[in-house]
Image (spheres, grey):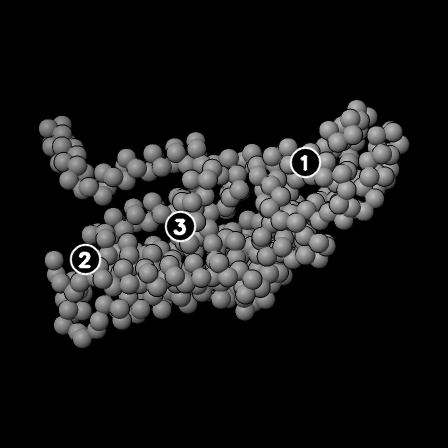
Amino acid sequence: MWSRVLAVIVKELRQLSRDRMTFAMIVMIPLVQLILFGYAINTDVRHLPAAVVDMSDSSYSRALIQAVTATQVVDFSERLSNVHQAETAITNGQIKAALVIPVDVGERLVRYSSGHYMTEPVAQWLVDGSDTVVASTIKGLRKMPMDEVLGNPHSEGVPTLEVVQYFNPEQRSVVNIVPGLLGVILTMTMVLFTAVAIVREREQGNMEFLITTPIRPFELMLGKIVPYVIVGFVQVGIILGVGHRLFAVPIRGGLDSLALAALLFILASLTLGLVISTVARTQLQAMQMTVFVLLPSILLSGFMFPFEGMPQVAQWISEILPATHFMRMARAIVLRGAEVANLGYDVLWLLGFTLVGLAVASLRFSKRLD
């Protein structure tokens, strides 16, 4: 008995060694996860894109800006003239927070330096509260000591900066998770469905019928995609509907903007699945390659960890993933009420990814038995 079992073990090991795709997944999946969790994943958020609304434009306000910049929590990339511009920039996702410095900031700082604390703060933070990690990071600056500005030892531990959280003042994590689940679930299902499409045709012997038909590669690719677009919209409706009913997740944006964003992402994900299906030789290989794409999509897209907390190289990699762009769009539309017209960069990227992917899949597909 043991000799027969040993013979089967040897046979399986030889088969695994000959299957290059499976062998590569055995080695690459743990390596990728180790690198992602050890290098790219970072919950200690730094250098958040922020703006400053300096209504004072004085030496006091400039000293305050320098003190906040020295914490390395935010990088002031923009200077805006009023609060309305700051709110618009937060809604469109251009910045994560805005520091509003009042006209009488000098008087407020002098009062703090003398030990006469006021009910009003020195300045005010406007924060994108839809991301709970970002909001918590900015709230850590509430009690920032002002002795760096005026040499005041009495201000330590006293709230000096007020924090106003937009879109999610209760800091409920489910509000941020549900729109992100749209990207994760659609990536998982759309890529997997189409990744096995061409492979299944080949394994089931249907490729012979396709060879005898006048259908062109592009027409076949398009025909494979359209049915799953409907499936994708059904999933979007289920996630948002249940999330809104059970967890009171608000849907502030227009449904037309959300539908267009979902359509672009579904098409991009289906196209990626088609490209995988033209590379894989078996359905097992197709599923393995799907997992290889799914892991970075979950870890690097901003779903679990803040995008701003990742190293620059990891951010470059995440920009390649369709899920990263859809996460921004879904959260901007659902939570912040943004319009898809104000998210032009992500729209154009998803559209370009779809067109390039369709072209690659069509060129790689060949109606031959081999």
Percent coordinates x, y for residue 248 in the rendering? 64, 55
Residue lying at 22% horizontally and 71% vertically, measured from the top left: 216
Q: Is residue 170 visible?
A: no
Task: Please say whether residue 41 is visible from this viewpoint.
Answer: yes
The residue at which mark 2 appears reads as 203
- Amino acid on which the number 3 mark rests in the picture: Ile
Residue 7 lies in quadrant = top left
User: Are the two marked residues, 2 and 1, in contact with CB atoms closer than 8 angstroms?
Assistant: no
Disc 2 from disc 1: Cα separation: 64 Å
x and y percentages locating residue 81 in the rendered image: 71, 54
Looking at the rendered structure, the kind of residue marked 1 is Gln
Residue highlighted by disc 3: 320
Label drawn at residue 66: 1
Residue at coordinates 13% horizontally, 63% vertically from top-left?
368
Q: Secondary structure at mark 1?
A: helix
Secondary-structure class at tag 3 = helix
